[in-house]
């Protein structure tokens, strides 16, 4: 009978693993080669380019500006060298690390309690929408997941055996993980402190009691009272000093979004109120405990140093050899420059405020990363409500302390941005802690199966959203759905025009990588240089000019409204390229997806022309003196061809472009030439032009019978005239051509019918 039960248990495990692994690979590999997102693959391109350049003999921190520690770069470079240098192979590296993480997760659960907990923990990670998102991408997060779980496994071994060997191994893996990305550091420090606390029973009892206080049901009411009091304080402050500054600063942290650092004032008040109430309600005496901890630390300084060395050893070796010895700028690039991205103390309120912001704005899909946590917390609250009993587990006490210290480190000490992607280590500890607690609750079979069914259904729905709806651009996540298609067509253009051996600069490094272009290694991470190193675009462009870079690729990523100073610097870069270069190729969709190639001019602007054109939001965008004038697209038989616009240069002097504009099912082709002060459109006989201006326009016209008298064209009226002027701000657009007919459709839109339409642009001198 025993062997039958054992075989049955093995069969369950095998079936569970098959289902989990199958689910993992389906959700991670779906679309791995076809999905590209200009808004999100900047980081992927940066890491892939760094790995490629390493394989070409360049070194990060010396030859390449790089903002993360070296381990991930070199592991990725080795992987690409072995299996091939392309983005799919790079993504498979992350998938591989995520798969290893599942195996480790099972071992952790089994070590904590049982194989059932191991399977549950593994299954949760396989179905976690956040991990489904990051595992198939060339991000550090899969390596952070791997090293966090590896260190957690040996931490659990240490707790169960009290063998310090496992504590050293646990800290070693955490330290090694920190040589991949620093976002694991708060967890690593928390791990170090928890292990150190564990060396003394009395000290650890204090830590356990503190965790019990912080996770006590009474904290719900303490937090509620704290929020009521801070609301009254903020209201009273506004009553006393009703200025815009006070109104901006005195918010209710968490309920309102943190937008300025000055809002640390009400945040500090809220924390102080919460701390006082917690001390009062639980009658906490902490002074003597702090003194005892200080004495314990001094007496055990040798153990503290040895544990610290276990963590620091891999950092000293990896970062010492591959970082510090390579460049004196290493510490600044990887640590100091990153220090200002987040802000301790208010990080928690920034995080909570963002979540409430999604609720207020009805963008609930942006909380998809929190679905597992929301479900787990809902079940915990149900357990508390039903007052179900549970069996305590010694390991859970250590996990509770580890989570509390990690939580404190991430939200109140570390300058890490409070982004779910950067909090993976914290969530892994919390998932394990909550699952361990639930596994100890005495559910009835009906309760257990009902809870699991609801849990799995909601996770499946969230995963469907992440795997299928998200890449379709149907959710509120920003997704440039045409990224791969546009890159593939641009690649054909580059090969066809023999440009692949030229030196390019692409603001999004993924374009450089995917298109296989040559570039200047140090400047591949424009965003990092601007945001973290405070390099301005003038310095970047000067350096690129000295290195004879003539071709520039601008794309969807740079046109997004980024936080300052990045947005200002990117606009400066766009203006410089528009003014000093000419468009070779432009392609855009109505939804905002765009990709362009410019070449810096080797001769002055044609006849001092200030006219420039772009493909923008599926139309032609005309600019004069760096000011947007109008969007132009063709129509035919009442069908608008503004879904997509492709522009290719056909002649440089004179400057002529071939334009193709698309509707949902057909296309229109025409030519467009630019002279010193005019544009000429040669359209098919059955097509018209629509001009959408960026402000209201006045249309004046003169008839053949009375050419010296200009009349004003009103809305929804048309005119055949020998002379038509469109007045836009301080510009005059004079139209000429064969059989010109103009209709004013709205205050800012006109329709033009005719052959060989010429638009002369002059600027009135005010």
Image: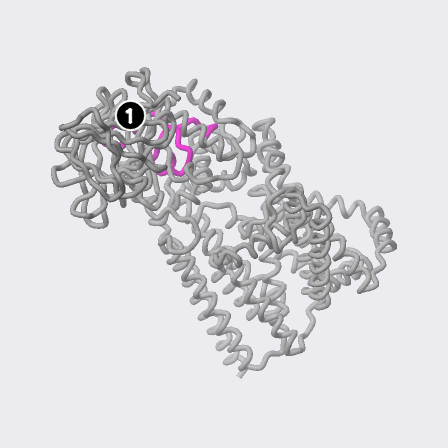
- Between 162 and 17, which is closer to the camera in this rendering? 17
Q: Callout 1: 10 Å neighbours few (<14), some, many (20+)? A: many
Coordinates of residue 749 in the picture (x, y in percent): 29, 40
Residue at 49% of width from left, 70% of height from top? 13
User: Which residue is tagged 1?
Assistant: 761
Coordinates of residue 481 in the picture (x, y in percent): 35, 48
Above/below status of 429 relative to 3: above
Above/below status of 340 relative to 14: above
Is residue 490 visible from the viewing direction of this image?
no
Magenta span? 494-523
- Between 50 and 545, which is closer to the camera in this rendering? 545
In the image, 582: left or right of 58? left
Residue at 84% of width from left, 56% of height from top? 286
Image quarter hosting the C terminus? top left
Is residue 300 visible from the viewing direction of this image?
yes
Magenta stretch holds residue 522 = yes
Residue at 34% of width from left, 34% of height from top? 516
Residue at 43% of width from left, 57% of height from top? 466
Coordinates of residue 499 in the picture (x, y in percent): 29, 27
């Amino acid at each position: 009978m025993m062997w039958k039960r054992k075989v049955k248990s093995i069969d369950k495990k095998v079936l569970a693993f098959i289902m989990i692994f199958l689910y993992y690979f389906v959700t991670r590999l779906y679309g791995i080669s076809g999905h590209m997102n200009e808004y999100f693959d900047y980081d992927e391109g940066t890491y892939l380019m760094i790995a490629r350049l390493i394989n070409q003999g360049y070194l990060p921190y010396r030859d390449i500006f790089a903002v993360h520690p070296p381990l991930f770069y070199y592991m990725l470079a080795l992987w690409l060298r072995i299996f091939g240098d392309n983005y799919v192979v790079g993504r498979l590296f992350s998938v591989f690390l995520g798969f290893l993480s599942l195996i480790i997760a099972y071992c952790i659960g089994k070590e904590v309690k049982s194989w059932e907990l191991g399977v549950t923990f593994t299954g949760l990670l396989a179905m976690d929408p956040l991990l489904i998102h990051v595992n198939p991408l060339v991000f550090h997060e899969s390596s952070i997941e791997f090293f966090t779980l590896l260190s957690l496994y040996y931490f659990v071994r240490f707790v169960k055996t009290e063998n310090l060997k496992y504590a050293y191994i646990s800290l070693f893996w955490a330290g090694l993980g920190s040589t991949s990305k620093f976002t694991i550091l708060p967890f690593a420090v928390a791990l170090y402190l928890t292990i150190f606390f564990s060396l003394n029973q009395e000290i650890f009892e204090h830590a356990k009691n503190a965790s019990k206080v912080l996770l006590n049901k009474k904290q719900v009411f303490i937090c509620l009272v704290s929020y009521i009091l801070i609301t009254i304080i903020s209201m009273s402050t506004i009553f006393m000093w009703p200025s815009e500054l006070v109104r901006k600063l005195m918010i209710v942290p968490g309920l309102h979004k943190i937008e300025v650092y000055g809002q640390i004032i009400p945040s500090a008040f809220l924390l102080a109120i919460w701390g006082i109430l917690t001390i009062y309600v639980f009658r906490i005496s902490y002074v003597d405990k702090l003194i005892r901890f200080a004495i314990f630390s001094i007496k055990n300084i040798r153990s503290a140093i040895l544990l610290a060395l276990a963590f620091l050893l891999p950092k000293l070796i990896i970062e010492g050899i591959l970082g510090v010895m390579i460049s004196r700028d290493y510490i600044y690039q990887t640590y100091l420059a990153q220090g200002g991205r987040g802000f301790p103390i208010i990080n928690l309120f920034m995080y909570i405020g963002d979540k409430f912001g999604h609720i207020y704005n009805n963008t609930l899909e942006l909380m998809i990363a929190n679905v597992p946590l929301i479900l787990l917390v809902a079940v915990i609250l149900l357990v508390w409500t039903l007052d179900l009993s549970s069996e305590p587990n010694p390991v859970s006490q250590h996990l509770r302390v580890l989570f509390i210290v990690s939580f404190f480190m991430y939200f109140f000490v570390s300058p890490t941005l409070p982004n779910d992607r950067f909090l993976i280590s914290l969530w892994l500890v919390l998932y394990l802690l909550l699952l361990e607690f639930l596994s100890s609750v005495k559910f009835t079979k009906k309760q257990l199966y009902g809870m699991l069914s609801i849990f799995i259904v909601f996770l499946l729905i969230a995963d469907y959203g992440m795997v299928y709806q998200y890449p379709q651009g149907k959710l509120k996540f920003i997704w440039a759905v045409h990224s791969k298609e546009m890159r593939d067509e641009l690649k054909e253009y580059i090969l066809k025009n023999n440009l692949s051996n030229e030196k390019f600069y692409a603001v999004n490094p993924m374009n450089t990588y995917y298109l296989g272009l040559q570039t200047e290694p140090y400047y591949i991470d424009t965003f990092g240089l601007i945001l973290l190193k405070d390099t301005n675009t003038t310095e970047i462009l000067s350096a690129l000019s000295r290195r004879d870079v003539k071709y520039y690729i601008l794309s969807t990523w740079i046109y997004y409204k980024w936080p300052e100073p990045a947005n200002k610097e990117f606009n400066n870069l766009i203006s410089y390229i528009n003014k000093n270069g000419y468009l070779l190729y432009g392609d855009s969709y109505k939804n905002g997806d765009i990709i362009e190639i410019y070449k810096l001019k080797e001769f002055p602007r044609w006849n001092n022309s200030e006219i420039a054109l772009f493909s923008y939001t599926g139309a032609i965008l005309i600019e004069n003196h760096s000011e947007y004038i109008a969007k132009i697209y063709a129509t035919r038989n009442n069908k608008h061809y503004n879904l997509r616009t492709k522009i290719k240069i056909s002649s440089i002097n004179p400057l002529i472009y071939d334009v193709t504009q698309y509707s949902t099912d057909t296309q229109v082709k025409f030519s467009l030439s630019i002279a010193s002060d005019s544009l000429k459109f040669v359209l098919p006989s059955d097509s018209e032009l629509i001009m959408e201006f960026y402000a209201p326009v006045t249309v004046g016209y003169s008839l053949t019978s009375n050419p010296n008298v200009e009349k004003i064209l009103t809305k929804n009226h048309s005119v055949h005239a020998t002379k038509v002027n469109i007045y836009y701000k301080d510009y005059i657009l004079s139209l000429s051509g064969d059989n010109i007919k103009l209709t004013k459709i709205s205050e800012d839109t006109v329709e033009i019918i005719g052959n060989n339409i010429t638009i002369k642009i002059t600027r009135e001198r005010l």
